[in-house]
Image (tube, rainbow, N blue to C red):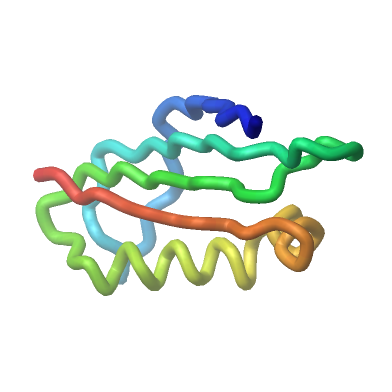
Amino acid sequence: MSKKQDVFFPRVPGPRKADEKTVPGFSVKAGGIRRDEHPTSFKTIYLEFDLNSGDAADSDIRKAIHMSGEKYCPVRDMVGNNVEIVTDYRITL
């Protein structure tokens, strides 16, 4: 039986450029399902982005998630071909 493992990353502040949205709060929850057989590496990784913003739209967060995975995150390149990565997001005001 696969076991789901959860990890929580607290708020991650970052620099703000003139064309970016106002984001007073941001967090990511990560979890995964491991393979039953050896080696028991992850077969699925879940990333849930929680964004607090009054002016960010769905398209903004989808673009940010895409850019983080395709351009900025070398780990995603390393595991992306062997592990299913599922992302979800929530925007609160």
Spot occupied by residue 71 in the image (x, y as percentages of width and height)? 63, 70
Can the viewer see residue 92 in this picture?
A: yes
Residue at x 49% of width, y 70% of height: 66
**Residue at image x 84%, y 39%?**
37
Instruction: From the viewer's side, name the closer residue of 11 and 35.
Output: 35
Query: What residue is drawn where x is 22% and y is 52%?
Result: 22
- Which quarter shows the C terminus? top left
**Residue 55 image point, x, y percent:** 13, 59
Relative placement, left or right, of 23 versus 2 is: left
Q: Quadrant of the N terminus?
A: top right
- Residue under the point 59% across and 64% down: 69
Note whether 89 is above or below 7 in the view shown.
below
Residue 18 in view (yes/no): no
Q: Residue furthest front?
A: 1
Q: Which quadrant of the view contains residue 32?
A: top right
Q: Is residue 68 left or right of residue 82?
A: left
